[in-house]
Amino acid sequence: QVQLVESGGGLVQPGGSLKLSCAASGFMFSAYSMSWYRQPPGKQREQRELVASITGDGMSNYIVLDSVRGRFTISRDNANNILYLQMNSLQPEDTAAYYCKVSDRDYWGKGTLVTVSS
């Protein structure tokens, strides 16, 4: 079955960096666009924000959330079925649970928590 397992979250100081990973299995990873979402504290699942997406072949990627443009980068390794989110210059407002998702399917990981605080 489809499995998406995020990792790489943690506590980081403002201005720091983290790289999130999402290990995918159970489907033909390279055939699907993938996305990162985030859910800030106190927000409901329905209020998750689309952060970024990338096409199956990795040739096109989109930073959707204006507040992270220029700081976050989405990428993928199709040989190893891994999706990445490189996050630089992190700010307290980036604090959230981050989820990977198959873009046009209702398959989600369980999330990894990112806390930006001094």
Image (cartoon, helix red, strand yellow):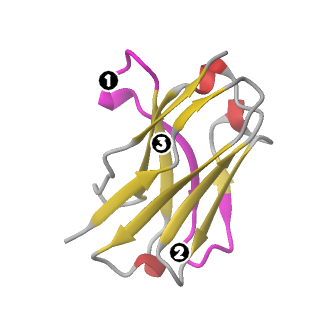
**Mark 3 and 1 residues: CB-CB less than 8 Å, in contact?**
no
| Mark 3 Cα-neighbour bin, 10 Å: few <14, some 14–19, many ≥20 | many
Total marks shown come to: 3
Residue at position x 32%, y 23% from top? 44
Drawn side of residue 95 relative to residue 13, left or right:
left
Image quadrant occupied by the C terminus? top right
Residue 46 in the magenta stretch? The answer is yes
Q: Secondary structure at mark 1?
A: loop
Q: Is residue 105 above or below residue 109?
A: below
Q: Residue at point 75% right, 40% down?
A: 88
Q: Earlier in the sequence, mark 3 or mark 2?
A: 3
Please tell me which of labels 3 and 1 falls first in the chain.
3
Q: Is residue 91 left or right of residue 103?
A: right
| Kind of residue at disc 2 | Gly
- Residue 44 numbered mark, or none: 1
* Mark-to-mark CA distance, 1 and 2: 28 Å
Secondary structure type for disc 2: loop
Quadrant location of residue 99? Answer: top left
Could you tell which of marks 1 and 2 lies nearer the N-terminus? Answer: 1
Judging depth in this view, the residue of 9 and 111 nearest the camera is 9
Residue under label 2: 56
Residues rendered magenta in the picture: 40-61
Categorize mark 2 by other alpha carbons within 10 Å: few (<14), some (14-19), many (20+). some
What residue is shown with label 3?
A: 37
Q: Residues within 10 Å of mark 1 (few under 14, many from 20)?
A: few
